[in-house]
Image (cartoon, helix red, strand yellow):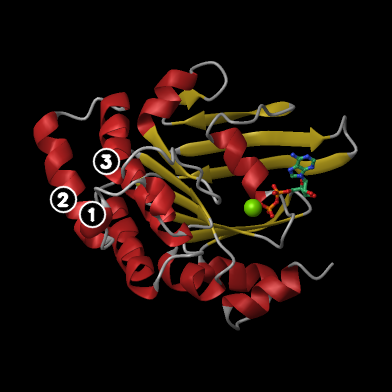
Amino acid sequence: MIELRGVSKSYNNGAVKAVDNLSLSVRPGEIFGFLGPNGAGKTTTIKMMVGLLKSDSGSIMINGYDVEKEPLQVKASISYVPDNPEVYEKLTGLEYLTFLADVYRVPREERLARMKRFLELFNMTGAVGDLIQSYSHGMRQKIVLIGALLHEPDVFILDEPMVGLDPKSSHNLKEYMREHCDRGKTVFFSTHILEVAERLCDRIAIISNGRLIACGTMEELKEQAKNTGSLEHIFLELTEA
Ligand SMILES: Nc1ncnc2c1ncn2[C@@H]1O[C@H](COP(=O)(O)OP(=O)(O)O)[C@@H](O)[C@H]1O
Ligand SMILES: [Mg+2]
C-alpha cells in the first residue's frame, strides 16, 4: 500500500517546482504505472517515496509507515531500483547479492534458492562471479534488480526499469511483476513505454509539471480524456497543455 497526500517538492530554493501537491494511492495487489513527459517529476516523486529526498510538504505512507517518521520500517518493506544503477564496482555480482541478502536478513536457504532463480530469470548465472566493473549497463541493471528482489519486498518501486534491458529480460521482468502482484504485493514503476503500461498496469497515473492530470484504469483514463484510443493517444492529449 502506498499513500501520497499533498506531496510537494521544489529545487533551488523554490525556483523549480518539481512535484506540486501530488496525491495518489496504490493498493496491494496492484501494478501501478507512473507516466509523464521528461521532467514531469516522476524521479523526484519516487526518490521521496524511498526516502532519498525529503518532501517540502505533504505525507507519504508505505505499508502503513510514514516515510519520514519511520524510515527503517519503510525501507525494510520496499525495494527500489533506480533509473541509473550505481553499484559497487569492486565487488563481484555474488558478493553484491550476498551483501544485500545480509542487509535484508534473508535466511541462507531462501537466499540461495532466490539467487539461483533470479540469476536464471535474468540470464546472469554465468556472470555472477565476475567483478561488477566488467558488467555492461544492462548487466548492472539486472544485478541491481536481482538484489532488489532477494527479500521479496511487499512494495517494489522501479524507475524506468525496462530501459537498457534486453527483450527477454524485459519480458521476464514483466511476468515477474504480475506474479508478485498476484501474491498480494505491490509494484509501482515509472515508464515511457506506453504499450507496456497499457498492457501490464492495473492502474496508471499521468503527471505533468509535477501535477497529477489523470489516474485510473485504462477504461477510466479513456473516460477522463474522452478518448477511446490507445494510451498513446490519451497521453498525448492529456499532456498537450
Ligand atoms: N537535483 C536537482 N536540482 C534541480 N532541479 C532538479 C533536480 N532534479 C530534478 N530537477 C528538476 O525537477 C523537475 C522534475 O525532474 P524529474 O523528477 O527528474 O522528472 P522525470 O523523472 O519525470 O523526468 C525537472 O524540471 C528537473 O529539471
Ligand atoms: Mg526520471
Number of other residues with Cα within 10 Å of mark 3, as a class: few under 14, some 14 to 19, many 20 or more: many
> Which label number is shown at residue 150?
3
- For image coordinates 79% across by 53% down, the residue present is 209
Answer whether labels 2 and 1 touch (C-beta < 8 Å). Answer: yes
- The CA span between labels 2 and 1 is 5 Å
Number of other residues with Cα within 10 Å of mark 2, as a class: few under 14, some 14 to 19, many 20 or more: few
- For image coordinates 53% across by 57% down, the residue present is 160
Give whichever of discs 3 and 1 has the lower sequence position.
1
Residue 25 shows up from this direction:
yes
Measured as percent of width and height from the top left, residue 154 is found at 33, 38
- Amino acid type at image mark 1: Leu
- For image coordinates 38% across by 74% down, the residue present is 167
Give whichever of discs 2 and 3 has the lower sequence position.
2
Depth check: give the residue in front, 127 or 149.
127
Whether 53 is drawn above or below 237: the answer is above
Q: Quick one: SS at disc 1?
A: helix
Whether 214 is drawn above or below 73: the answer is below
Measured as percent of width and height from the top left, residue 13 is found at 87, 29
- For image coordinates 20% across by 59% down, the residue present is 120
- Amino acid type at image mark 2: Lys
Look at mark 2 in the image and give the residue it sits on: 116
- The CA span between labels 2 and 3 is 10 Å
Look at mark 1 in the image and give the residue it sits on: 119
- Amino acid type at image mark 3: Leu
Whether 7 is drawn above or below 221: the answer is above
Q: Quick one: SS at disc 2?
A: helix
**Mark 2 or 3, closer to the camera:** 2
Answer whether labels 2 and 3 touch (C-beta < 8 Å). Answer: no
